[in-house]
Amino acid sequence: MAFSQLPLILLLVAKNNPITLLTGITYQKLNFLHRAASRACLLCSWIHAIAWTPRVWEKGHFSHAYLISGIIALFAFTMLWTTSLRIIRRVAWEFFIVTHIIFTLLFLVGAIFHWKKLIPLSPCGSLIV
């Protein structure tokens, strides 16, 4: 469910994005969708992590690569959200931009290695970012 939001989130990243070009709706108005889809993705990611924790605990898969990459992705996405709070954007815009790029890349790499089926989609996401 969380991964289903990624195309919309990535399409709405740039000011001159395809959705603006097709609809004529300004970036400022579409940015609300970027933030809403990101929050939905983060919430679904945390629900996924909490729901799967008992199974991982039972099987003892703590050192498996898929789990470690999932934890990295979730940490990066949580930090991405945390450093995107309005107060941080207003006070330290450059910090916001730099951390947004770093945590986005870390999240995407972690997510791709967490769920290998994302690998064919990664070039498309890379082109958008």
Image (spheres, rainbow, N blue to C red):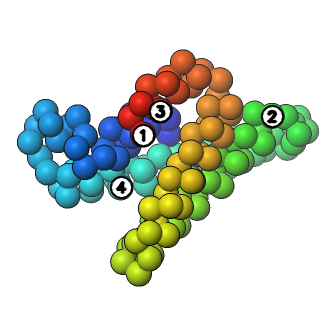
Q: Which residue is mark 2?
A: 65
Using the image as rendered, state which of residue 119 and residue 64 is in the foreground: 119
Q: CA distance from mark 1 to mark 4?
A: 16 Å
Quick check: can you spot residue 94? yes
Q: Which residue is mark 1?
A: 129
Q: CA distance from mark 1 to mark 2?
A: 25 Å
Q: Earlier in the sequence, mark 2 or mark 3?
A: 2
CB atoms of marks 1 and 3 within 8 Å: yes
Q: Which residue is mark 3?
A: 126
Classed neighbour count for the residue bearing mark 2: other residues with Cα under 10 Å, few (<14), some (14–19), many (≥20): few
Q: Residue at x 59, y 22 (%)?
A: 119
Does 95 sit left or right of 61 as displayed? Answer: left
Label 2: element kind: helix
Using the image as rendered, state which of residue 97 and residue 22 is in the foreground: 97
- Residue sticking out furthest to the top: 120
Q: Nearer the viewer, mark 1 or mark 2?
A: 1
Q: Earlier in the sequence, mark 1 or mark 4?
A: 4
Q: Nearer the viewer, mark 1 or mark 4?
A: 1
Classed neighbour count for the residue bearing mark 1: other residues with Cα under 10 Å, few (<14), some (14–19), many (≥20): some
Q: Position of residue 9 (x, y in %)?
A: 38, 43
Q: Is residue 21 above or below residue 80?
A: above
Q: Position of residue 3 (x, y in %)?
A: 50, 35
Label 4: element kind: helix
Name the amino acid type tagged 2: Ala
Name the amino acid type tagged 1: Val
Q: CA distance from mark 1 to mark 3?
A: 5 Å
Q: Nearer the viewer, mark 2 or mark 3?
A: 3
Q: Position of residue 89 (x, y in %)?
A: 40, 72
Q: CA distance from mark 2 to mark 4?
A: 30 Å
Q: CA distance from mark 2 to mark 3?
A: 22 Å
Q: Nearer the viewer, mark 3 or mark 4?
A: 3
